[in-house]
């Protein structure tokens, strides 16, 4: 990581895409309507940072730390979150697009998702215990060896999760989306 340290700054309407982004430690910063698409965020630390109405599609996250980072109304398509610093991972997503992203092997138990699009997201070997996935679209998301103990899927929809290969003890689900837990049995639903 570089020695670059930025604290308590607001970045508004800036396009970092193609211009380079200085890796470093960003604390108590606020990014508003910024374009960071394709930017290499590797080896940076984001602590108590908020991204609002930004585009982070395709960013690189190798050895990046996200400590209490909030993403609001932000596009985060196709991101591989698996190389982040695991012990410094706490992210909160609200009204975000995370389609085609991968959280393979991540521990997200201190994170939350609200009203997000998580289509075709890879949650294989992910720790989602206690995580809120409220009102999220999980169409074609992949769950295998996923720990979802106590997860809250209230209002989540379009998911297919096999309870035989995932841990779902105490998970909270809503009907009719909960029928996605029975998909592998090829049941016919009656009136």
Image: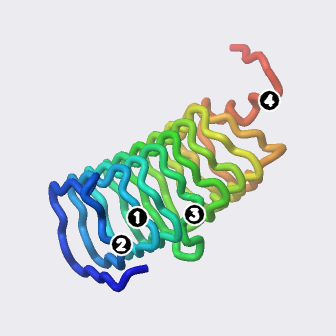
Q: Secondary structure at mark 3?
A: loop
Residue highlighted by disc 4: 184
For this view, does 170 lie left or right of residue 93? right
Mark 1–mark 4 CB contact (< 8 Å): no
Spatial distance from mark 4 to mark 3, Cα to Cα? 31 Å
Spatial distance from mark 3 to mark 1, Cα to Cα? 11 Å
Quarter that holds the C terminus? top right
Mark 2–mark 4 CB contact (< 8 Å): no
* Marked residue nearer the N-terminal end (3 or 1): 1
As displayed, is residue 93 above or below residue 107?
above
x 18%, y 65%: residue: 11
List x then y, in percent, for residue 120: 57, 37
* Marked residue nearer the N-terminal end (1 or 2): 2
Residue highlighted by disc 2: 23
Select label 4 or label 3 by which is in front: 3
Return the residue nearer the eye: 143 or 7. 7
* Marked residue nearer the N-terminal end (4 or 3): 3
Spatial distance from mark 2 to mark 4, Cα to Cα? 45 Å
- Residue 83's tag is 3
The answer to whether residue 155 shows anywhere in this view is no
x 24%, y 62%: residue: 31
* Marked residue nearer the N-terminal end (3 or 2): 2
């Amino acid at each position: 990581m570089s020695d670059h340290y930025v604290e308590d700054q607001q970045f508004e309407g800036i396009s970092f895409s193609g211009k380079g982004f200085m890796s470093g430690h960003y604390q108590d910063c606020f990014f508003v309507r910024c374009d960071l698409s394709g930017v290499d965020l590797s080896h940076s630390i984001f602590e108590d940072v908020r991204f609002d109405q930004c585009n982070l599609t395709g960013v690189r996250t190798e050895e990046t730390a996200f400590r209490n980072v909030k993403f609001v109304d932000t596009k985060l398509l196709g991101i591989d979150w698996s190389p982040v610093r695991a012990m410094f991972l706490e992210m909160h997503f609200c009204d975000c697009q995370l389609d085609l992203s991968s959280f393979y092997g991540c521990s997200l138990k201190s994170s939350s998702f609200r009203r997000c699009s998580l289509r075709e997201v890879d949650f294989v070997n992910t720790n989602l215990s206690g995580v809120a996935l409220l009102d999220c679209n999980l169409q074609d998301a992949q769950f295998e060896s996923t720990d979802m103990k106590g997860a809250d899927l209230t209002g989540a929809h379009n998911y297919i999760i096999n309870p035989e290969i995932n841990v779902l003890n105490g998970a909270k689900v809503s009907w009719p989306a909960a029928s996605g837990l029975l998909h592998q049995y090829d049941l016919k639903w009656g009136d």
